[in-house]
Amino acid sequence: MDQNLTDRAFWKAFWESKKDLIFYIKPDYVFGNILAKLIKDNGIKSAVELGGFPGYYTVFFKKYQHIDATLFDYFIHEGLIKELLAKNDLKYDDISVVEADLFTYEPKVRYDLVTSFGLIEHFADVKDIISRHVALLNPKGTLFITLPNFTGANGWIQRKFDPENYSKHNITTMDPQLLMDICKELGLVEVESYYHGKFSVWLENNAQQSGFVKGIVKSIWLVGKLFTKAVPVETKALSPYIVLKARMAH
């Protein structure tokens, strides 16, 4: 089985099909409160966002946390990054950008915080892709990874209405216990992994769906939101994300 479940053509088409890519990043951006606490508690001065084009978290790190921020991706579109930075009152020179293949990249710089958001589930060998993150960590550095949870309600939506996108995800990665075990095998400490967020569902190709499908997804979304408002739980069945946190031992 190929390690990479996607290729450059997939990502080029993916980003070119996206609308509303450029927007203002708010201080409470998704996972922002968790990241702010990690940065404060661990004295983090530098961060890299792996597979993060066009760089939403790179903007967050620079704009609100005032740390050295690097965007690393296999596919970089400089024009879109400049548009995003300008929208957020930043310049291209305010951040670092690395366009490279993580599997052949020889690290020249390491970071206090290595992050990725919706990256590791696109690879077949979970331990290997996490080890690529770890290789970029400074001593006592912090690892922070998030991925979608397709093992509950949102996974059913993906399988039913967007099987092509679903097939690009390695569902076995979406297991907090597995992720913790891998981090411990890699020598990391202070390892945590858990389901995150109240109910949400989505479709990457929502704009191309029929009104009927859009109606079904919206109805499920509304019912789930009402339920988790009354019963605010974070579970495998309902939560849209999985979070993984860990640190280098030394």
Image: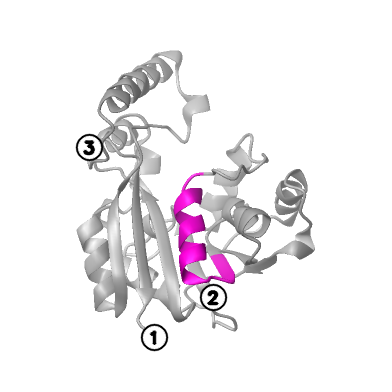
Q: Where is residue 45 in the image (x, y as percent from the top left)?
A: 59, 72
* Amino acid bearing label 3: Ala
**What whole-number distance in Å separates the C-alpha atoms at marks 1 and 3?**
36 Å
* Relative side of 178 to 64, left or right: left
* Amino acid bearing label 1: His
Please report the bounds of the magenta region as a residue range.
Answer: 30-48
Residue carrying label 1? 250
Question: What label sits on residue 111 in the rendered view?
Answer: 2
Badges 2 and 3: C-beta atoms under 8 Å apart? Answer: no
Q: Where is residue 158 in the image (x, y as percent from the top left)?
A: 34, 35
Q: How crowded is mark 2: few (under 14 residues within 10 Å), some or many (20 or more)?
A: many
For the residue pair 231 and 164, the one nearer the viewer reads as 231
Taking the spot 40% from the left edge, 15% from the top edge, the residue there is 215
* Relative side of 223 to 108, left or right: left
Taking the spot 46% from the left edge, 62% from the top edge, the residue there is 38
* Amino acid bearing label 2: Tyr
Helix, strand or loop status at disc 1: loop
Badges 1 and 3: C-beta atoms under 8 Å apart? Answer: no
